[in-house]
């Protein structure tokens, strides 16, 4: 294990996904230089309006292409399905007509641990809405020489797999490693872990990733040990 000055701890401060998104918008992404989406590096303003990069194309979800959405890098379903409320429902998950329900809505209502995981700001990044929608809950992979799915934005999606642009791979990797290291209800497959370890080494942190983690720590309370160790190594802290 790498040397660390930090205590491994989960998010125990914010359990509202809606609140987490507002805090990211108001307290983390403060300037125009910082307001860029994860995958396509599209600029967005304080009202979440997107300025897409030249050559960006979105065949599906065109209305969502105009707005920023907050993407779970580790999809909510990928950890949510490990909760019994997601899979089977719960006693409290009954609608106004007396019909039982399950899935994300039930996990959110019935299980505080799921709410904390869902609202963990280290796992939330801005994305063009149509890219977020198209990525869905697909795992990341290397897809080879296929066409980009969004024109000039080098995201590739095929057979329920996603290859992100090189600029976002390190951030994605360290987010996966963070979630895997902290939360018992999420564990990567060996194949995904191998890819994330490789991306973490190949695509190191930059100053903004380190600053973002510092700001989230002040708001959310817990440290992202994966990012902070990388920042120490890179000399950013």
Image: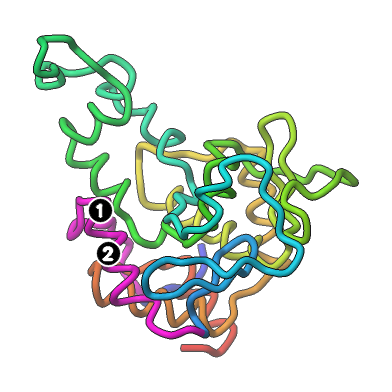
Q: Which residues are magenta?
A: 6-32
The residue wearing badge 2 is 22
Locate residue 149 relative to residue 4 in the image: left or right.
right
- Residue, x 32% and y 56% (percent of image)? 120
> Whole-percent x and y of residue 181?
43, 52
| Along the line of sight, the residue nearer the viewer: 208 or 48 | 48
Locate residue 188 relative to residue 4 in the image: left or right.
right
Q: Secondary structure at mark 2?
A: helix
Asked if the stretch drawn in magenta spans residue 31, the answer is yes
Crowding around mark 1 (Cα neighbors within 10 Å: few <14, some 14 to 19, many 20+) is: few
> Whole-percent x and y of residue 165?
72, 60
- Residue, x 24% and y 16% (percent of image)? 101
Residue 220 sits in which quadrant? Answer: bottom left
Please tell me whether residue 36 is drawn above or below residue 181 in the rendered image.
below
Locate residue 45 relative to residue 88 in the image: left or right.
right
Circles 1 and 2 in contact, beta carbons < 8 Å: yes
Asked if the stretch drawn in magenta spans residue 67, the answer is no
| Along the line of sight, the residue nearer the viewer: 6 or 70 | 70
Please tell me whether residue 151 is drawn above or below residue 204 in the rendered image.
above
The residue wearing badge 1 is 18
């Amino acid at each position: 294990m790498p040397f660390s000055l930090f205590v491994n701890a989960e998010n125990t401060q914010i359990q509202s996904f809606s609140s987490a998104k507002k805090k990211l918008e108001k307290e983390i992404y403060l300037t125009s230089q910082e307001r860029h989406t994860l995958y396509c590096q599209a600029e967005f303003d304080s009202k979440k309006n997107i300025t897409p990069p030249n050559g960006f194309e979105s065949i599906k979800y065109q209305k969502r292409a105009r707005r920023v959405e907050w993407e779970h890098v580790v999809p909510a379903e990928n950890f949510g399905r490990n909760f019994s409320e997601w899979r089977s429902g719960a006693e409290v998950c009954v609608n106004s007509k007396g019909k039982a329900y399950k899935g994300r809505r039930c996990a959110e209502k019935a299980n505080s641990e799921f709410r904390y995981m869902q609202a963990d700001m280290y796992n939330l990044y801005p994305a063009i809405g149509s890219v977020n929608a198209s990525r869905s809950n697909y795992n990341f992979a290397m897809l080879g020489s296929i066409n980009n799915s969004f024109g000039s934005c080098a995201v590739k999606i095929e057979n329920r797999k996603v290859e992100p642009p090189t600029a976002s791979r390190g951030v994605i990797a360290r987010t996966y490693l963070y979630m895997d290291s902290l939360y018992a209800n999420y564990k990567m497959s060996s194949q995904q872990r191998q890819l994330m370890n490789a991306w973490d080494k190949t695509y190191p942190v930059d100053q903004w990733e380190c600053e973002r983690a510092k700001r989230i720590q002040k708001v959310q309370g817990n440290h992202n040990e994966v990012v902070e160790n990388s920042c120490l190594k890179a000399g950013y802290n």
